[in-house]
Image: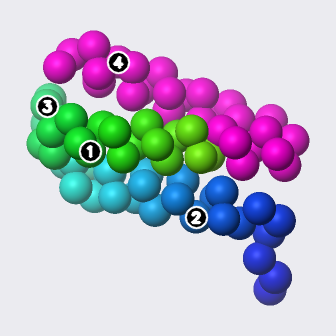
Amino acid sequence: MALPAYWWLLLPAVLGQCAFFLLSGALRPGEKTLQGGPWLLTVLAASLLSGLAYGAVQSDPVFIAAQCFLAATVFRIWRKQ
């Protein structure tokens, strides 16, 4: 299986979003606060921008829509802090 075009944009998006969800406690039931602090939110925002760039370059509306949904989540978490 060959790597997709512009895989270097996809790699930080996937790694950053995985790191956020694993380190933040976002997957733990009942958690109401972000456990990792503002630096972890910065990692998520950077991976979000990388994912949006990948979706735009590949002209993938589903990927762009998913990243926009994630952007709304980041904004909501950021406003709570």
- C-alpha distance separating marks 1 and 4: 14 Å
Q: Which residues are magenta?
A: 52-81
User: Measured from the top left, where is residue 63 in percent x and y?
Assistant: 71, 42
Q: Are marks 4 and 3 in contact (CB under 8 Å)?
A: no
The mark nearer the N terminus, 2 or 1, is: 2
Callout 2, which amino acid? Leu
Q: Are marks 2 and 3 in contact (CB under 8 Å)?
A: no
Residue 47 pos. (x, y %)? 49, 47
Figure quadrant of the C terminus: top left
Kindly report the distance in space between the C-alpha atoms of the residues bearing marks 1 and 3. 12 Å
Q: Position of residue 16 (x, y in %)?
A: 42, 55
Left or right: residue 6 compared with residue 38: right
Which quadrant: the N terminus?
A: bottom right
Q: Earlier in the sequence, mark 1 or mark 4?
A: 1
Q: Residues within 10 Å of mark 2 (few under 14, many from 20)?
A: some
Q: Secondary structure at mark 2?
A: helix
Tell me which numbered mark, 4 or 3, is placed earlier along the sequence.
Answer: 3
Residue at the (71%, 66%) spot, across then down: 7
Q: Is residue 17 left or right of residue 53?
A: left
Decide which of tag 2 and tag 4 comes sooner along the chain.
2
Label 4: how many residues lie within 10 Å, few (<14), some (14-19) or many (20+)? Answer: few
In this view, the mark in front (1 or 3): 1
Mark nearest the camera among 1 and 4 is: 1
Q: Amino acid at mark 4?
A: Arg
| The furthest residue to the top | 79
Q: Dot 3 surroundings within 10 Å: few (below 14), some, or many (20 or more)? A: few
